Image (cartoon, grey):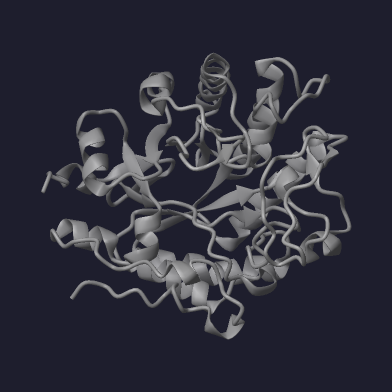
Amino acid sequence: MASTAALFSPLKVGSVTIRNRVAMSALTRNRALGTIPNDIMAEYYGQRAAGGVALIASEGTLVSRQGTEWPHAPGIWSKEQVNAWKKIVNTVHNNGAFIYAQLWHVGRVAHPDAPEQKLAGTPVYGPSAISARGGKFRHIPGLPGYVTPTAIDDPWKIIAEFKQAALNAKEAGFDGVELHGANGYLPHQFLDSTSNKRTDQWGGSIENRARFGLETLKVMIEVFGENVALKVNPSGGYNDVGMPLQETLDTYSYFLTESDKLGLAYITLSQTHPKPRFTGKKRSTVHDVIASYRHLIKDAKVFINAAVLPEEGAALIAEGKVDGVVIGFNWITHPDLVKRVQHGQPLDNIPDIKHLQAGKDDSALSVGYTDYPAAT
C-alpha cells in the first residue's frame, strides 16, 4: 500500500488549524424532512467527525426555498433551520472537527411544480431563459425534467440571499461558509457562456460572467472574513454546462485568480465529471484541473475532489500539488474513513445504493445513512 503519511499533518485553513488533510465533501443525502435538519443528521455528521475527518463541508444548504430534485434538502433561511443546524455543528465540534456550511442555489435546475417551489411562490430563476437538458424530478408526477427558467431581473437580490444565509450560518455556529460554484448550479450557470447569454454587466465577457460569483464571495466575506471557501468544477458536464477548452481555461484562470485575491480559506478543484452525455457525446470538457489552475492560486489552500482515493491524495500533497483532499463517496460508506486509513484497514463497506437518498419511508432515515459499520 502506498504511503498515506502526508495526509496526517495539521493544516491552517482560514483562522483555524485542522488536525489532518482529509476533508469531507458536501453530499446531498435528502434527509431533512421539510427542509429542517434533524437528530439523525446530527448523528451522521458526528459519526464522521468521530471517524477522524478534519473539515466537513455540509451537504448543499439552500439559501432560499427552491424546488430542487431533492425534496428533503436542508435550508438555512429560517430561524427553525438555524436552531436545528446548531445541534449538528456542536456535535461536529465535540468530536474534534470543523464544519463549513456549503451555500447553495440551484438556479435553473429547480422545477415550478415541485412542492417547495410552489411554497416559495417564485419562478425558477436562471441567468438567462435557457433550459438545461436532462433532469428527473422523481417526486413530481410524470418525472419531468428541467424547464426554461425566468431570467433573473436583478442578480443583487440573489446575492443578498447568500449574505443572509451566511449570517444565519454564523448564528448557527458554523466555522465558515463554502460557495457551491460547481456542478451547474447558479454561480456556475452565470460563469458558463452556454447558460449565460445576458447582455448586461452580468454576461458576455469573462469579467462580466465572473461577476456573480465574485460579488457573492465578497458578501460572504463581509460575514465570515477569512473563513470563506469556494468549490468549482471547471470541466463542467453535470447539469448541462461546459465550454470549449480554451474558453474554459480563460474563464477559470480569470475567476480563480480574482477569487484568490479575496483572501479565501480554501478553493476546492473538482475533477472531470465523466457521466453526463447529450446526443451521444460527453458534456464534460476534460482537462487536468491541477495542472491548469493550481499555479494561479497563491494564497488560498487548495483541495482536490472527485474520485480521489486517500493514497492518491497523499501523493499529491507530498508532491506539493495540493494542500488537502476532499473525499466524497467513501465518507458515505465509511464513517471512520480516516481511522481506517491511519491503521491500514480497507475501505470495504458495501454501498447501499438503494438508500443513498431517503426512500419513501420517512421513518427509516437511518437506513443507508448512519448504519454503516466502523472497522473493529
Quadrant (top left/top right/bottom left/bottom right) for the C terminus:
bottom left
x and y percent of residue 142 in the render?
Answer: 76, 63
Look at 67% across and 17% down and name the residue there: 207
Is residue 144 or residue 313 the one in the foreground? 144
x and y percent of residue 164 in the render?
Answer: 72, 50
Is residue 361 or residue 135 the one in the foreground? 135
Residue 91 showing in the rendered view: no
x and y percent of residue 321 in the render?
Answer: 29, 28
Is residue 162 or residue 354 the one in the foreground? 354
Q: Is residue 76 above or below residue 247?
A: below
Most extreme residue toward the bottom is: 363
x and y percent of residue 137 in the render?
Answer: 69, 59
Most extreme residue toward the front is: 280
Q: Is residue 287 rendered to the left or right of residue 58?
A: left
Q: Is residue 122 above or below residue 311?
A: below
Count of labels in the image? 0
Q: Quadrant of residue 6?
A: top left
Look at 62% across and 59% down and name the residue there: 171
